[in-house]
Amino acid sequence: MKKLLGLALAVVMVLSMMLPAAFADDAVTISFFDKNSGVRTFDDPVAKELEARTGVKIDLISPSGNPAEKLSLMLAGQNYPDIVLMDRSSDIVNQYIEAGALVNLSDYLDQMPNVVAMYGDTLNKTRYSDGNNYYLSNWYGYDPDPVNGFICRYDYMIELVGQERADSDEPFTWSEMLDILKRFKEAHPESTNAVVMSEPNSGAINGTFAGINGIYPFYVSDGKLQMSVRDPAFIEAIHQMNELYREGILDPEWTSNSQELRNQKLSNNGAFAYVGAYWDTWTPSAALMGSENANAEYLSYKVIPDGVTSADLPLAGRSSLGWDAIAITTNCKNIDAAIKFVDYCASQEGQDLLLWGIEGQDWEFVDGVRTPIGDIVDRYLADPSNTVDQTGITKWTWFVKNDVHPDDGTACRIWFNTKDRSATYAYQNLTNGYYDSAEFAALEPAGSTIEALQFQGVVDVFDQYHPRMVNAATVEECDALYAEMLNALENAGEESVEAYMSELYFARLDLWGLQPVSSK
Amino acid sequence: MNVALPKKHKKALRSRLWDQRYLFLLMIPGIIWVLIICYAPMTGLYMAFTNYRPSQNGYFYDLFNGKFVGFQWFDYFFKNDFAMIMRNTLATSVLTLLFSFPAPIILAVMLNELKSIRMKKFIQTASYLPYFISWVIASNIFLTFLAGNGLINDILLALGLTSERILFFQHGPYFWWIIAIANTWKGMGYNAIIYLSAISGIDEQLYEAAEIDGATRVKRIWHITLPTIRPTISILLILAIGGILSTGFEQQLLMGNNAILNYSDVLDTYAYRYGLAKGMYSYGTAVGLFKSIVSFILVMSANKITAKLNDSALF
């Protein structure tokens, strides 16, 4: 009896050891840091389908706070995950490359046929100074999609300029827009936030006013690259913002508006216009259209300087080299699996999965054209964030190519296949001035160098003076602050920073065989 | 007549160690913890004198093989942002100290004088709750209350104390006061507990005797309560002075904005922005090291002064 019991126990023990192995998940796990993932979890239908198709299980590492800080800490501790997605425009990419933390993808290009086919010339432009590719761009390719502008409430525009003018693609001059804003203020004296901006989103603010005035990210003149504040048009842009402030049109608390506060103000009846990206107003528009009327929607309008007839304004620069960089790190233990995963995501099939969803479930081919199934696009238009979270479509925007499908001409993202009114107005009014800003991207000095410190000092000076110039009580005070800022920039080492960046910039132009975009 | 007393023989060190072997054994985990967690990371301070660049060779290799640059980072800091950063740090700290040091003492003494136990417990709980609120929430409370259309402006307008709304977060010097008040509000209740525990140790007979002698309540506080808790006050003052350069971090990051960056940027936020957010590890370490050295000098000085003034010191 004792022997039998012992035998039974031994069998149970052996089986218990073998069973987990027999049912073990043989998928390779790849850890992936996505700076944009926020609090999202990798468990939606698209994520599961991607794992099933690639045989790779993704262990998503969330930024949990400031992504730049996390990337920096991971680099210092050399505990970065297998794949990292970081901001391409900052110097963090070069820091990772210089630290030898990124796998040289040039050695693996023969194993990534889809990457080579999809990226094409972009791979040449994103090579490091040693001629190798250490990362792949995200949101790459020529991208004439509109971004920043004056986004005004459509019902108020009808009230102030009439239906025909509100629907027209004819630009408003600065004086005309200012007059409209003043008339709004007269008609709605209770409004303290006729124009809402948000300093934490300063790129959008500066992008909008820089665009109106034809200012590029850097001022290139006489074979020298300088900060954009040296552009003669810069002070005009500041004067325009200052005029809005002095007239009591600009929300006086624009410097401390968080995204939530900004949306709260835009959802309020006292706001008329927003300065920034047209998609920033989707949430307040949805709230207003529900509570006010169907035309209480923020739509994009074109504004150009007085006396200018150029059809190329406002400028809308977007880099063909993308916003983010995705790289495989040297900590990756299974390079082959990571390469396979990357190549699949970058392929057209992978892109369709990430940006259109699962074929047969979310979309299908009808007469050779990709067509959404059911009410999926309507659901998105009614509730964008929840629909993205639930379906997983466009939740993971990795290796995205800005282009239409070459076979049927549909947009790269399912949602963009049908334009709503907001997108229609943005495309109608904000697209003329598109240019490729790739030549200006990632010029800043990297790592621990005096130039890098000086660059940060220059950025700090601008960040401090910009709100003060806008909020100046008089034009004279604004001009005095501008002069003071130029002095402070010189003291912060602007000249040596510009010398560093100029060298890099003109070497890049030579390499790419380009002329400065501003000289065209 | 001098009588030679037999000399008391002190035991040999080895013997004394052996006698107390169990106590030392108990201390070993603590000592190991201090060595690993507190002292070992200090090797990283060497980074402040090199140009640290991470590579694939491991942290210690990179640390000790980075190019030695001497005081280059300190030099850059002193020549550029030092004056502004120190002004902001000291202004915020001194104001914080001004409010937050006496506030818990006053609160503790007042609570001690309360006769209603229920009321005492309620106030005590209500006053130390802010300590447990994260700065994210606390900052949002301040941002909302002090907004142009916030409650504080409504009250000021209603009372006729101002004719137009004050934009608190647009004026740099206001920011120092806001941070000082926020720091005080958040830490006052918690620090009061320390004083309350010190007060609870005071012999009741002292109060009874004073009462018989006709001492008023104010006199009892002045002549019994405050002198008795003076050692606690001294120690907390030393600690507060030592932390004068640690004026906060999250609150500045969360409540500050670019319009007032030249007033809100303090040593910690500056070191963070450069060292971590921008990956300039050596520069960030240099700024941090400067802060630590100054803090150490301040603690030692405060300790010395306090020891001379009232016979009680931290060490």
Image: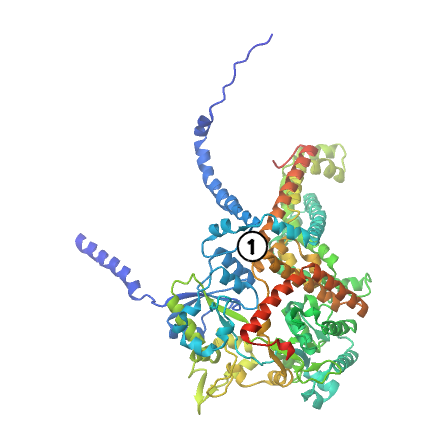
Quadrant placement of the C terminus of chain A = bottom right
**Image colouring:** rainbow
The foreground one among B220 and A3 is A3
SS state under label 1: helix
**At label 1, which amino acid type do we have?**
Tyr
Residue B79: give x, y in percent of width and height: 68, 52
Quadrant placement of the N terminus of chain A = bottom left
Relative to B180, residue B150 above or below: below
Relative to B213, residue A386 above or below: below
Subunit ID for the residue under disc 1: B
The foreground one among B241 and B62 is B62
Residue annotated with mark 1:
B281
Q: Is residue B8 visible?
A: yes
Residue B62: give x, y in percent of width and height: 49, 52
The foreground one among A117 and B128 is A117
**Residue placed farthest to the bottom in the image?**
A367
Residue A310: give x, y in percent of width and height: 69, 84
Label 1, residues with CA under 10 Å away: few <14, some 14-19, many ≥20: many
Relative to A362, residue B61 above or below: above
Quarter of the view holding residue B172: bottom right
Horizontal arrangement in the rendering, residue B47 relative to residue B202 (left or right): left
